[in-house]
Image (spheres, grey):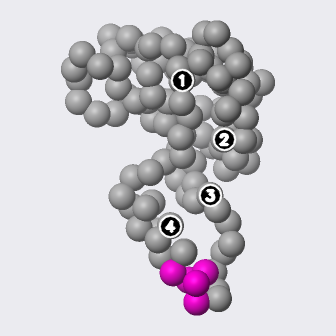
Protein backbone atom coordinates (compact mmCIF):
# COMPACT_ATOMS: atom_id res chain seq x y z
CA UNK A 1 0.00 0.00 0.00
CA UNK A 2 1.32 3.38 -0.91
CA UNK A 3 1.01 5.87 1.91
CA UNK A 4 0.77 9.46 0.68
CA UNK A 5 3.66 11.72 1.63
CA UNK A 6 1.03 14.34 2.51
CA UNK A 7 -0.40 12.22 5.36
CA UNK A 8 -0.77 13.94 8.70
CA UNK A 9 0.74 12.34 11.78
CA UNK A 10 -2.70 11.04 12.83
CA UNK A 11 -3.39 9.55 9.36
CA UNK A 12 0.03 7.91 9.31
CA UNK A 13 -0.48 6.42 12.80
CA UNK A 14 -3.86 4.97 11.78
CA UNK A 15 -2.39 3.49 8.58
CA UNK A 16 0.41 1.82 10.57
CA UNK A 17 -2.18 0.41 13.00
CA UNK A 18 -4.18 -0.92 10.05
CA UNK A 19 -1.12 -2.71 8.62
CA UNK A 20 -0.35 -4.26 12.01
CA UNK A 21 -3.96 -5.34 12.56
CA UNK A 22 -3.84 -7.17 9.22
CA UNK A 23 -1.23 -9.50 10.80
CA UNK A 24 -3.16 -9.70 14.10
CA UNK A 25 -0.88 -7.32 16.01
CA UNK A 26 -2.00 -4.31 18.06
CA UNK A 27 1.07 -3.02 19.91
CA UNK A 28 1.32 0.35 21.63
CA UNK A 29 2.95 2.75 19.20
CA UNK A 30 5.43 5.01 20.93
CA UNK A 31 6.33 7.09 17.84
CA UNK A 32 5.48 7.10 14.12
CA UNK A 33 7.43 9.33 11.73
CA UNK A 34 8.45 9.59 8.09
CA UNK A 35 12.18 9.44 7.36
CA UNK A 36 14.18 10.65 4.38
CA UNK A 37 13.82 13.63 2.10
CA UNK A 38 10.48 14.65 0.61
CA UNK A 39 10.15 13.86 -3.05
CA UNK A 40 8.02 12.02 -5.57
CA UNK A 41 8.61 8.54 -4.14
CA UNK A 42 6.90 7.38 -0.94
CA UNK A 43 9.20 7.65 2.07
CA UNK A 44 9.75 4.94 4.70
CA UNK A 45 7.99 5.22 8.05
CA UNK A 46 9.89 4.64 11.27
CA UNK A 47 7.78 3.16 14.05
CA UNK A 48 8.97 2.92 17.65
CA UNK A 49 7.23 0.40 19.89
CA UNK A 50 7.24 0.12 23.67
CA UNK A 51 7.92 -3.60 23.99
CA UNK A 52 10.70 -5.63 22.40
CA UNK A 53 8.40 -8.68 22.39
CA UNK A 54 5.99 -6.81 20.08
CA UNK A 55 8.82 -6.15 17.62
CA UNK A 56 9.88 -9.78 17.55
CA UNK A 57 6.29 -10.94 17.05
CA UNK A 58 5.73 -8.46 14.20
CA UNK A 59 8.97 -9.41 12.48
CA UNK A 60 8.03 -13.10 12.68
CA UNK A 61 4.64 -12.40 11.04
CA UNK A 62 5.82 -9.88 8.45
CA UNK A 63 5.81 -12.33 5.54
CA UNK A 64 2.07 -12.89 5.99
CA UNK A 65 1.54 -9.38 4.58
CA UNK A 66 2.36 -10.87 1.13
CA UNK A 67 -0.87 -12.88 1.43
CA UNK A 68 -3.03 -9.75 1.73
CA UNK A 69 -4.19 -7.81 -1.32
CA UNK A 70 -4.06 -4.44 0.41
CA UNK A 71 -0.58 -4.68 1.97
CA UNK A 72 1.27 -6.94 -0.46
CA UNK A 73 3.78 -4.17 -1.22
CA UNK A 74 4.45 -3.18 2.43
CA UNK A 75 7.76 -4.35 3.88
CA UNK A 76 8.57 -4.47 7.59
CA UNK A 77 12.26 -4.25 8.41
CA UNK A 78 14.27 -4.04 11.63
CA UNK A 79 16.17 -0.83 12.29
CA UNK A 80 19.34 -0.79 10.19
CA UNK A 81 20.91 2.55 11.09
CA UNK A 82 24.70 2.74 11.10
CA UNK A 83 24.67 2.78 14.91
CA UNK A 84 22.90 -0.58 14.99
CA UNK A 85 25.01 -2.03 12.20
CA UNK A 86 28.13 -1.28 14.25
CA UNK A 87 26.56 -2.89 17.33
CA UNK A 88 25.66 -6.00 15.34
CA UNK A 89 29.16 -6.19 13.90
CA UNK A 90 30.60 -5.94 17.42
CA UNK A 91 28.33 -8.78 18.55
CA UNK A 92 29.46 -10.94 15.61
CA UNK A 93 33.10 -10.31 16.52
CA UNK A 94 32.37 -11.35 20.11
CA UNK A 95 30.57 -14.50 18.93
CA UNK A 96 33.54 -15.47 16.77
CA UNK A 97 35.73 -15.17 19.86
CA UNK A 98 33.34 -17.39 21.82
CA UNK A 99 31.57 -14.80 23.93
CA UNK A 100 28.52 -12.58 23.66
CA UNK A 101 24.89 -13.09 22.83
CA UNK A 102 23.88 -15.62 20.16
CA UNK A 103 20.79 -13.61 19.16
CA UNK A 104 20.32 -13.10 15.42
CA UNK A 105 18.21 -9.96 15.84
CA UNK A 106 19.41 -6.73 17.39
CA UNK A 107 16.46 -4.47 18.15
CA UNK A 108 17.80 -2.37 20.97
CA UNK A 109 15.78 0.74 20.25
CA UNK A 110 12.50 -1.05 19.48
CA UNK A 111 12.06 0.29 15.95
CA UNK A 112 10.48 -1.21 12.85
CA UNK A 113 10.45 0.52 9.45
CA UNK A 114 7.29 0.64 7.36
CA UNK A 115 8.29 1.67 3.84
CA UNK A 116 5.52 2.71 1.56
Q: Are marks 3 and 2 in contact (CB under 8 Å)?
A: yes
Q: Quadrant of residue 61?
A: top right
Q: Using the image, determine if residue 111 lies above or below residue 107.
A: above
Q: Quadrant of residue 54?
A: top right
Residue for badge 3: 105
Q: Which mark is residue 74?
A: 1
Rounded to the nearest angstrom, the CA distance separating label 2 from label 4 is 17 Å
Residue for badge 2: 59
Rounded to the nearest angstrom, the CA distance separating label 1 from label 4 is 25 Å
Using the image as rendered, state which of residue 39 and residue 53 is in the foreground. 39
Q: Is residue 57 magenta?
A: no
Rounded to the nearest angstrom, the CA distance separating label 2 from label 1 is 13 Å
Q: Secondary structure at mark 4?
A: helix
Q: Using the image, determine if residue 59 lies above or below residue 94.
A: above
> Where residue 68 appears, x then y in whole percent?
68, 15
Q: Earlier in the sequence, mark 2 or mark 4?
A: 2
At a point 23% along the width and 30% down the height, the residue shown is 37
| Residue range highlighted in magenta | 93-97
Amino acid sequence: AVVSTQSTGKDLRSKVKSVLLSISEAPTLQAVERVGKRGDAPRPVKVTLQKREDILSILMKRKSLRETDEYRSVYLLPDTTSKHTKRRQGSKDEQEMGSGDSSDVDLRDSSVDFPG
